[in-house]
Amino acid sequence: MPKQSQATSTSDLLSSEDGEQLLVYARQALETWLYEGTFPILDLKGVAARLRHVGASFVTLTINEQLRGCVGALEPTIPLAHDVQQHAIAAATQDFRFPPVQPFELTEIVIEVSCLTPPRLLGYQSPDDLFHLLRPQIDGVVVMDGTRRATFLPQVWQKIPDHRSFMNLLCQKMGSPADIWLKKKIEVLTYQVQVFQESK
């Protein structure tokens, strides 16, 4: 059974069986792409109903608990099962922070799938408000300034529990000065996730 954690306000939760199947789809997609160089074909007729619904996900790859790739989408555009397949391959091949995953690494990689609720604009008046409104371990956070945008999943709070450091690093990820959120009002959105992780 996959490890599962929940940080979501949605009532339409996926079951542990749904999560286990998403991890299977992600693993199969990685293996097919890395060994055969082709994208796996998944017939939705044999997929559970909830996984056929349009959904957004992030897929995170780790080796020895160290990040090896993470790619996803904030907005749902395709069936969740297909979304997970695509982002599993993208996490292995398109995360600019890392070289592409090689086939020999597959036995060491642990896959984590995060299924997102739709992001919602956070109403705040001053930077101090964010210290009270942002919920560590629960909220994923999106920052936007013009055409720039970046996000941290809720899991990032485990490594950056301090609100100020969290926002500074997120703004830097966006390509802006770390303290931009203290000097001007930027758009902040939050979302929650349901997380499924392969057993190590």
Image: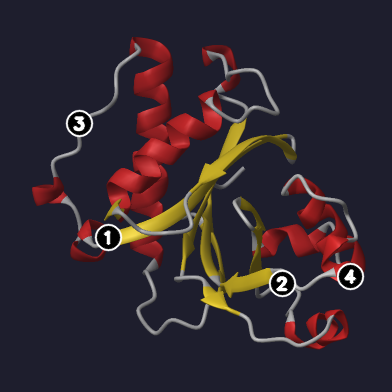
Reading the image, the residue beneath label 2 is: 137
Which of the pair 161/20 is nearer the observer?
161
The amino acid pointed to by label 3 is Ile
Q: Which mark is residue 143?
A: none
Q: CA distance from mark 4 to mark 2?
A: 22 Å
The amino acid pointed to by label 2 is Gln
The amino acid pointed to by label 4 is Leu
First in residue order: circle 2 vs circle 1: 1
Instruction: Give the quarter of the figure containing the C terminus.
Output: top right
Look at the numbered disc 4 and give the secondary structure of its residue: helix
State if disc 1 and disc 2 touch (CB < 8 Å).
Answer: no
The amino acid pointed to by label 1 is Val
Reading the image, the residue beneath label 3 is: 41
Q: Nearer the viewer, mark 2 or mark 1?
A: 1
Look at the numbered disc 1 and give the secondary structure of its residue: strand
State if disc 2 and disc 3 touch (CB < 8 Å).
Answer: no
> Dot 3: within a 10 Å radius of its alpha carbon, few (fewer than 14), some, or many (20 or more) residues?
few
